[in-house]
Amino acid sequence: MSSETAQSKFQASSQQQNKQSGLHCPISDAHIDRKEIERISRECRNESFWYRGLPLSLGSMLITQGLIYNGFLSSNPRFGSLPKIAFAGAFGLAIGTMSYIRVCQRKFQSKGVCPFGPEHKRHCHHTCKECEANFGSNGRENSKPSAS
């Protein structure tokens, strides 16, 4: 019971802070579960590694080793084929992980969270009377121009 009251007090204080900072909008005041976001984020990291990153990394390493073995690429006299294979593996892992971003975006959007891109900043996305009074029609706070 005490955790519920503490959580409700925390939510009330965060809502007051949002109202004071000018970032509060009554329409977009949806509560998003942090545990659900963490679960989706963890799931995206695991799936991007196992389904895209690791296969592309191993495949690129195998192809690079085949090219070195057949003589299309030369091995380093000091380190052998290790630097080229390591680079191919790291590059394949990076490309494979980045290729999974769209799937993760869809997962977040299906839960109502849009954390990607500059257009998804944490402010009011609606044109309501309260927000228009605080920020004006162009999204900036109404302020008087300076004298200088």
Image (spheres, grey):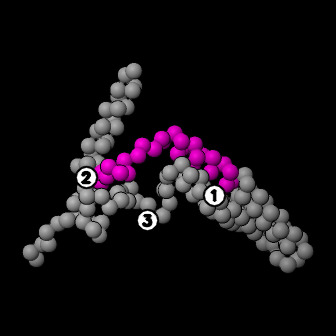
Q: Kindly identify the amino acid type of the residue bearing the numbered disc 1.
A: Val
Quadrant of the image occupied by residue 131: bottom left
Within the image, what quadrant is residue 53 found in?
A: bottom right
The residue indicated by pointer 3 is: 119
> Which quadrant holds the C terminus?
bottom left
Mark 3–mark 1 distance (CA, rounded to whole Å): 19 Å
Name the disc covering residue 135, or none: none
Q: Tell me the kind of residue under disc 3.
A: Glu
Work out which quarter of the rendered image holds the N terminus and state it.
top left
Q: Which residues are magenta?
A: 21-49
Q: Is residue 41 magenta?
A: yes
- Residue 35 included in the magenta stretch of the image: yes
Ranked by sequence position, the earlier of labels 3 and 1 is: 1
Specify the farthest residue to the top. 1
Task: Confirm or deny contact between disc 3 and disc 1 (CB under 8 A).
Answer: no
Q: Is residue 142 left or right of residue 31?
A: left
In the image, is 131 to the left or to the right of 96?
left
Left or right for 45, reference 132: right
Residue wearing tag 2: 21
Per the rendering, the mark at residue 103 is 1
Between 138 and 41, which is closer to the camera in this rendering?
138
Q: Secondary structure at mark 2?
A: helix
Numbered circles on residues, count: 3
Question: In the depicted view, which residue is nearer to us: 21 or 45?
Answer: 21
x, y percent for residue 130: 25, 55
At 35% from the left and 28% from the top, the residue drawn is 6
Mark 1 surroundings: few (<14), some (14-19) or many (≥20) residues within 10 A: few
Q: Is residue 119 left or right of residue 81?
A: left
Q: Earlier in the sequence, mark 2 or mark 3?
A: 2
Q: Report how far apart the C-alphas of labels 2 and 3 lie in the structure.
A: 20 Å
